[in-house]
Amino acid sequence: MSIQYKYLHTMIRVKNLDESVKFYTELLGMKEIRRTDVPDGKYTLVFVGYGDESSHTVLELTYNYGVDSYDQGTAFGHLALGVSDIKTSIEALRAAGAKIVREPGPVKFGKTVIAFIEDPNGYKIELIER
């Protein structure tokens, strides 16, 4: 018997839930899939993504009541999204107010074209031209 695994989601903690949901839905085109508020636990979870959880990996945004900053540490790297036209995407994101932290260009020692943006919480998001 073989055990099968499926990648379900990645969770990040956010300091402002509304700002974070707006960033991922309006700027990056994700949809809010579900939201769970847990007053007894003093947190709210919002799952966003590009499709239903049954067939897509999603992003879990966790807001802990009253927490307005986090230390991200040095272990976390970035989230990555594929994009069909990286230059047009970066210009649209820039016009919408996204923070661009690396302009489009080839990865060091390679040919893959990438760029990086930053979400309102300081998480890096790599855009990879597909």
Image (cartoon, grey):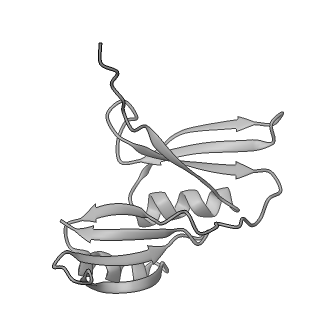
Q: Residue at x 58, y 72 (%)?
A: 122
Where residue 89 sits in the image (x, y, percent)?
A: 30, 75
Q: Residue 39's spot in the image, x, y percent?
A: 81, 37
What percent of the width, then of the height, locates residue 100? 44, 83
Is 8 situated above or below 16? above
Residue drawn 83% across and 56% down? 66
Q: Judge by depth and name the residue closer to the eye, 5 or 94.
A: 5
Q: How many marks?
A: 0
- In this picture, is 122 found above or below 109? above
Of 128 and 48, which appears nearest the observer?
128
Instruction: Give residue 56's quadrant in the image.
Output: top left
Q: Is residue 32 visible?
A: no
| Residue 100 shown left or right of residue 113 in the figure | right
- Residue 125, by quadrant, is bottom left
Instruction: Decide if residue 60 is in sight here.
Output: yes
- Which quadrant: the C terminus? bottom left
Extreme top residue here? 1
Q: Residue at x 64, y 67 (%)?
A: 73
Looking at the image, the residue that sits furthest to the front is 1
Residue at 75 percent of width and 67 percent of height? 69
Q: Position of residue 68 (x, y in %)?
A: 77, 64
Tell me which corner region of the image, top left, top right, bottom left or bottom right, holds residue 1. top left
Eyeballing the image, is 73 above or below 11?
below
